[in-house]
Image (cartoon, rainbow, N blue to C red):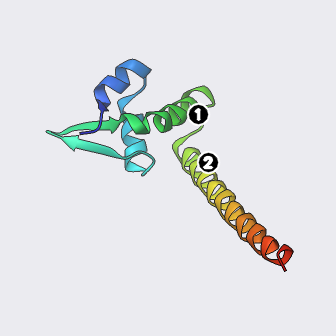
Amino acid sequence: MSERISREELVKIYNIEITFFDELVDGGLLTVETENEIRYLLYDDLSVFERFTNWHYDLEINLPGLEVINDMLRKMEDLKQKNRDLMNKLSAISDQYEDI
């Protein structure tokens, strides 16, 4: 079983509203495990949670704004990966022509 932390512990540690955590989950920004009606966040997803918490509380970005930013960042990462793939293909093609 992966290491995890309960929603209640996160609320205490980060001094946030429990509704904010629930809104992140309901909005699809966080994935949780539920056991005995207790929601848990995996430690692997803790950095994502911290990022959203900082953006919301420090920068005062609302939930729709978090969703837009998250979507844009995901698209940027996808584009970066596609760019790397294309550069690798171009390099391979270039290497083939150099061998001729």
Q: Amino acid at mark 2?
A: Ile
Q: Nearer the viewer, residue 21 or 88?
A: 88
Write down the residue under mark 1: 55
In the rendered structure, the answer to whether residue 6 lies left or right of residue 36 reads right
Q: What element does badge 2 sit on?
A: helix
Q: Quadrant of residue 20?
A: top left
Position of the C terminus by quadrant = bottom right
Q: Amino acid at mark 1?
A: Trp
| Horizontal and vertical percent position of residue 35 | 18, 40
**How many other residues sit within 10 Å of disc 1, few (<14), some (14-19) or many (≥20)?**
some
Please tell me which of labels 1 and 2 falls first in the chain. 1
In the rendered structure, the answer to whether residue 36 lies left or right of residue 18 reads left
Residues at circles 1 and 2 in contact by the CB criterion of under 8 Å: yes
Q: Quadrant of residue 30?
A: top left
Q: Nearer the viewer, residue 95 or 24?
A: 95
In the rendered structure, the answer to whether residue 66 lies left or right of residue 27 reads right
Position of the N terminus by quadrant = top left
- Residue in view at x 26 percent, y 38 percent: 39
- Residue in view at x 42 percent, y 52 percent: 28
Q: What element does badge 1 sit on?
A: helix
Write down the residue under mark 2: 69
- Residue in view at x 74 percent, y 70 percent: 92
| Horizontal and vertical percent position of residue 61 | 60, 37
